[in-house]
Image: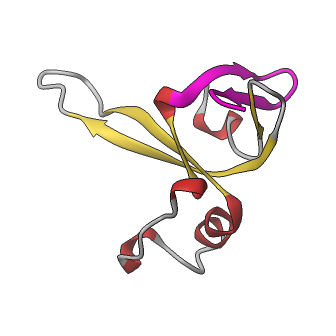
Amino acid sequence: MLLSDLLEAEVVTEGDERLGRVHDVRVRMLDRRGSDGQQMRVIGLVIGARGIRERLGLDVGRTGKPIADRDLIEWEQVVEVDGKRGRVVVRGG
């Protein structure tokens, strides 16, 4: 799966509550000594208005403003990624 496959995917809870769309993906670089390339791990999905602003470059993460809990879905909460339907299912609801 490519990170770009997650962008604009609909995010819903297991109870089918619509939370919004993925506007940005948070990743962490992994320290893999001896590896031929940098490896990344997805740590979260940014949804909501903050995500739109960041994607357009209007409100970047470097501003120091915290992302509201409702705007960041931690990757551990993801239950299923359905690429065919463009949908991410998360725990809850």
Q: Position of residue 44 (x, y in %)?
A: 49, 42
User: Is the image coloured rainbow, by chain, by secondary structure, or in one colour?
Assistant: secondary structure
Judge from the rendering whether residue 74 lies leftward or rightward of residue 78; answer left or right.
Answer: left
- Choose between 67 and 59: the one closer to the eye: 67
Judge from the rendering whether residue 57 lies leftward or rightward of residue 33; answer left or right.
Answer: right
Q: Position of residue 86 (x, y in %)?
A: 82, 31
43 vs 76: above or below: below
Judge whether residue 43 is colored magenta. Answer: no
Quadrant, the N terminus: top right
- Choose between 25 and 47: the one closer to the eye: 47
User: What residue is drawn where x is 69% and y is 60%?
Assistant: 48
Magenta stretch, residue numbers: 77-93
Judge from the rendering whether residue 10 lies leftward or rightward of residue 54; answer left or right.
Answer: right
User: What residue is drawn where x is 35% and y is 76%?
Assistant: 64
Q: Position of residue 63 (x, y in %)?
A: 39, 79
28 vs 86: above or below: below
**Residue furthest out toward the front:** 93
Q: Position of residue 45 (x, y in %)?
A: 57, 44
